[in-house]
Image: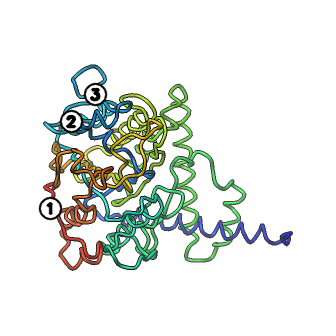
């Protein structure tokens, strides 16, 4: 149906008002950053990454289950990197995450996840982001990170995504910003002037104009950065530069952040020590190492948690890939964590210990792990933890 002549203007005004509101919130959060509270960045790997290629179990069963995609653990060139007597790390992370492990600033919690058995990306992602007690009716009005923000009364939370994710709903007033697109202005100078004119004479005028100024300055900085990186185009397009921008904002303005990274659904030709998944691990590792480097001394009071909706089948499929599984591996990084260890309840990786003869079991509920972490990091009591993660049993994994 043809739109009326006024429709584009109404759409423009709605979008402009939303953008102006986000800018005001971003400005307000920057001014109200709570000094002294631990920083927390939640990284969500969407797609269900193959945790058995990240944290490689030793033994014949692993090699037999993956004749084409197993990573050697024999000490040869390109082999997995030994962490302890049971586990090794993917070789693509030798230059990025292995130093953090050796420095006691990285820990892994295998056999992690949720009781959700749908093996559906969207259902399980939503279940994890909500953080509800198992068996309770799902609600989409709040997520566990949003409830944490509300409990802490922290006005500095931010999502580095194009839309506010479910995990941050319920806090009220959390802005979101896509750092990858700052070099291309969303509005030109004429449009900014029109929006500013809309707010002239109101209490919001200064916030709107200062918000535009801050955005323009960030855009110019990013444009210079991208020009300098033109000789290394892969870095400009990858996660590392985005992670460094996140680090700068969290160092100076924001205490709680969220970012998601896609591309982990490796049903076909995922590779082994090299290949598609190895490249993805390399990009992610470079990004996390860049975050650590960029945030500087603030790393000592920063915690990064990396989660995914589920793991993948332990055995490879007929396409030299893996399919949707169950248990996964949760990562915790930070300058003050007690890392260099694989934490949580564990079992030997054997056929008899697989869930439904195909997947890692879930022995460490992610909600219990996070509840224990939040209790240590923020001093939350049982009642507060119950509001953030209802029904969780806080588990002290020895991470802090």
Does the rendering let one see residue 34?
yes
Q: Is disc 1 surrounded by few (<14), some (14 to 19) or many (20+) residues within 10 Å?
A: some
Rendered view: 4 above or below 45? below
Question: Where residue 396 is drawn, which disc sits there?
Answer: 1
Image coordinates of residue 347 in percent, x first then y, are: 17, 50
Rendered view: 324 above or below 200? above
Residue underneath mark 2: 58
Q: Which image quadrant is residue 28 in?
A: bottom left
Viewer-nearest of discs 3 and 1: 3
Viewer-proximal residue among 112 and 369: 112
Residue underneath mark 3: 72
**Residue placed at 21% from the left, 35% from the top?**
58
Secondary-structure class at tag 3:
loop
**Which of the two labelled residues, at mark 3 and mark 1, occupies the earlier sequence position?**
3
**Which of the two labelled residues, at mark 2 and mark 3, occupies the earlier sequence position?**
2
Image coordinates of residue 368 in percent, x first then y, are: 23, 65
Does the rendering let one see residue 26?
no
């Amino acid at each position: 149906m043809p739109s009326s002549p006024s429709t584009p203007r109404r759409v423009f005004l709605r979008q402009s008002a939303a953008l102006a509101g986000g800018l005001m919130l971003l400005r307000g959060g920057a001014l109200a950053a709570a000094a002294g509270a631990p920083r927390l960045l939640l990284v969500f790997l969407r797609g269900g990454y193959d945790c058995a290629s990240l944290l490689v179990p030793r033994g014949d069963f692993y090699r037999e289950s993956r004749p084409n995609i197993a990573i050697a653990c024999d000490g040869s060139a390109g082999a997995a990197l030994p962490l302890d007597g049971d586990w090794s790390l993917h070789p693509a992370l030798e230059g990025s995450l292995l130093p953090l492990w050796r420095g006691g600033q990285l820990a892994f919690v295998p056999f992690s996840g949720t009781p959700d058995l749908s093996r559906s990306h969207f259902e399980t992602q939503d279940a994890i982001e909500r953080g509800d007690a198992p068996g309770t009716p799902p609600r989409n009005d709040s997520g566990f990170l949003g409830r944490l923000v509300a409990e802490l009364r922290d006005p500095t939370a931010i999502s580095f995504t194009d839309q506010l994710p479910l995990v941050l709903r319920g806090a009220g007033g959390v802005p979101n910003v896509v750092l990858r697109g700052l070099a291309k202005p969303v509005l030109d100078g004429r449009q900014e002037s029109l929006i500013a004119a809309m707010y002239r004479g109101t209490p919001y005028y200064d916030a709107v104009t200062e918000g535009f100024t801050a955005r323009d300055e960030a855009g110019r900085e990013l444009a210079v950065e991208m020009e300098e990186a033109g000789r290394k185009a892969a870095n400009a397009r990858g996660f590392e530069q985005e992670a460094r921008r996140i680090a700068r904002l969290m160092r100076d303005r924001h205490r709680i952040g969220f970012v998601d990274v896609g591309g982990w659904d490796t049903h076909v030709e995922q590779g082994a020590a090299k290949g598609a998944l190895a490249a993805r691990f390399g990009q992610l590792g470079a990004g996390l190492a860049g975050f650590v480097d960029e945030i500087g001394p603030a790393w000592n009071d920063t915690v990064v948690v990396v989660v995914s909706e589920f793991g993948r089948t332990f055995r490879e499929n007929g396409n030299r890939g893996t399919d949707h599984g169950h248990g996964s591996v949760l990562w915790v990084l930070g300058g003050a964590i007690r890392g260099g260890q694989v934490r949580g309840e564990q079992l030997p990786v054997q056929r008899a210990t697989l869930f439904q003869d195909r997947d890692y079991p879930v022995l460490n509920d992610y909600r219990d792990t996070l509840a224990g972490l939040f209790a240590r990091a923020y001093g939350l009591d049982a009642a507060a933890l119950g509001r953030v993660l209802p029904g969780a049993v806080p588990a002290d994994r020895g991470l802090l």
